[in-house]
Amino acid sequence: MGTWPPTGGGGATTVPPTVLASTYGADPTGTLDSGPAINAAIAALPVTGGIVYIGPGNFKISTTIQIGDGSQSQVSTRTGVVLVGSGAPAGFYPLLFIPGPGAQAGGTCRLFSGAAVDMLHVNGALSGWGLHNIDFDGASLGLIGLKEVSAQGGESSGCIIRGFVTCGQQTSSLREGSGPYTTKVSPNHMHNRYVNFAYGVPLIGQAIAIKLDGNGVDALTDTSFDTWENITITFGNYPTQVTGALSLFGIYLGGCDSCVFREVEFLNSTPTGGAYIGCLEYDYTGPASKFPNDCVIENVDFDTSAVCIANNGAPDATVSNVVRFIYTENGIPTDPKLVGLRWIPTPAPSTTTTTATVTTPTVTSGVAFTPSATADTMVYLQFAGTGTINSITIGPSTGAENTLVSSAATLTTENPVMSFRVPAAWKMVVTVTTTTITQTKVVTC
């Protein structure tokens, strides 16, 4: 979250309106449903928003938490809500988010599903919201962990989303051109940012970590301009390989444009026993106007050499998505050769050695010489004595020359070497007085 609380002008500290979920009955023991209490805390904030501090504990959620009250017919009347947990969430496998003293002492914030419902809805269109340091645990019971509808301008960090039977995070949009979204009010340009998120996909068929699908109808409902940075997606129960007749998915791209995933690590993504793991799934079913387009996945570790990227349906010629800069140590899938996908693996280190050629021509004061007739060069001139350089010029073999040094530059023992870049086939003239050009080196690469 950066520096907290934020600092205003002149060094003054500005604290946003803050309420405690415990004030409204949130139960850190996990016995009672804390959904209504968190909703009451959100409602207690001004309409311009603020912070709901949930704090440490295990909170059962059987009633969906609601941020915002927007719909296709109205822009949300409430905005700016930020939910804050406590500490860095402990990892759901030993190598991820090593729990510190706070986690070991129960100092982190875990929301776990107590019923087969979605855990959190962000109901836009609204601008400004956030989630920080919360472990969202579907416990293989909750449906969707985080469902966003035209949620815009969000900044979220340090969260875990795991164990949801439908998907961990789903981004969707209201329809542009309908209701209040007709004149310069776009409900599908999201500009959300998610940093240091970890996702766990449970061993439940068709479960998805992240799903971007607009509203599944047309391009006017695309999810656009969202960014994920430094995320991890783990399949099943690490490190046991996923097996059996089930399919699991990491990032499912449907109705979305111009979304970016940067620094992505997939884990446990090599299946056995007939299972399928789709790290990336591109959905090209339905009308072409809702196809995923201009989305970038970069700096990615697939953790497998198995086939893990697929198209669902057939894209048209207008589609262009990119996967680039692929980490290779833990296995790299072969080029899937998918229509509409540019696959740009990390280039292998060059095995070509470039050797510099060094020559030492004799240079006479006032006499033109050509360092190289075929290549650009660096010319190093070494002088002796404390005389002057009248001029150094370079130029084409025929034509005007360019003056590099003039006006009788004075040499001292502290500046006996000069270097110049000389284009191929150009001549060079060095004129000196009461000093000596002791050595000339011409370096050609």
Image: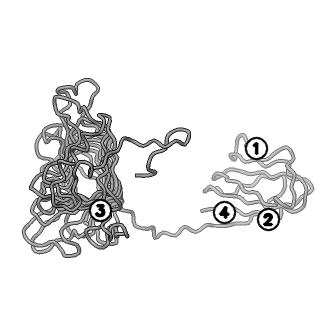
- Label 2 to label 4, Cα distance in Å? 13 Å
Q: Residue at x 15, y 53 (%)?
A: 144
Q: What type is the residue that disc 4 sits on? A: Val
Image quarter for residue 197?
bottom left
Residue toward you, 286 or 33: 33
Other residues around mark 4 within 10 Å, as few (<14) / some (14–19) / many (≥20): some
Q: Secondary structure at mark 4?
A: strand
Residue toward you, 302 or 403: 302
Q: Is residue 284 above or below residue 103?
A: above
Query: In the picture provided, is 299 more to the left or to the right than 77?
Result: right
Q: Is residue 369 above or below residue 174?
A: below
Q: Identify the mark at residue 403; answer none if there is no mark.
A: 1
Return the residue at label 3: 232
Other residues around mark 2 within 10 Å, as few (<14) / some (14–19) / many (≥20): some
Q: Nearer the viewer, mark 3 or mark 1?
A: 3
Other residues around mark 1 within 10 Å, as few (<14) / some (14–19) / many (≥20): few
Return the disc, 4 or 3, that comes first in the chain's sequence: 3
- Label 3 to label 1, Cα distance in Å? 58 Å
Q: Nearer the viewer, mark 2 or mark 3?
A: 3
Query: In the picture provided, is 330 more to the left or to the right than 440?
Result: left
Return the residue at label 2: 439
Q: Is the C-beta separation of discs 2 and 1 under 8 Å?
A: no
Residue 91, position as x, y percentages in the image: 29, 67
Is any atom of residue 348 visible in this view? yes
Q: Identify the mark at residue 443; answer none if there is no mark.
A: 4
- Label 2 to label 1, Cα distance in Å? 21 Å
Q: Is the C-beta separation of discs 2 and 3 under 8 Å?
A: no
Q: Residue at x 73, y 60 (%)?
A: 380
Q: What type is the residue that disc 1 sits on? A: Thr
Q: Residue at x 86, y 55 (%)?
A: 411
Q: Residue furthest right?
A: 434
